Image (cartoon, rainbow, N blue to C red):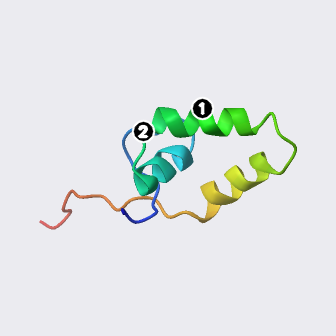
Amino acid sequence: MAALARPRNGRMIGGVCAALARRFGTSATTMRVIFLVSCLLPGPQFLLYLALWIFLPAEKSTASTAW
């Protein structure tokens, strides 16, 4: 399983669904559909999304900045 970090590529809003999809080995589209369907259920889905957006680290850049 990959580390839980918001990717720089392939994200739409905050990269939370893309990060969760990478972690659990599914596609980002599948994770986004699961999130949208879960919004039909009662619960704090949006608050959880915002918390993950704030607390998940962004993926480190692979480009080297050394001269």
Distance from label 1 to label 2 (Cα)?
Answer: 10 Å
N-terminal of the two: label 1 or label 2?
A: 2
Q: Which residue is mark 1?
A: 33
Q: For this rendering, which residue is in front, 2 or 10?
A: 2
* Identity of the residue drawn at 51% across and 46% down: 15
36 above or below 46?
Answer: above
Task: Residue 32: give x, y in percent of width and height.
Answer: 57, 36
Residue 39 location (% of width, % of height):
77, 37
Q: Position of residue 47 (x, y in %)?
A: 78, 52
Q: Amino acid at mark 2?
A: Ser
Q: Residues within 10 Å of mark 1 (few under 14, many from 20)?
A: few
Contact, mark 1 vs mark 2 (Cβ under 8 Å): no
Where on the picture, by quarter, is residue 2?
bottom left
Query: Looking at the image, which is closer to me, 17 or 12?
Result: 17
Q: Is residue 40 left or right of residue 64?
A: right
Is the residue 25 above or below the residue 11 in the image?
below
Q: Quadrant of the C terminus?
A: bottom left
Label 1: element kind: helix
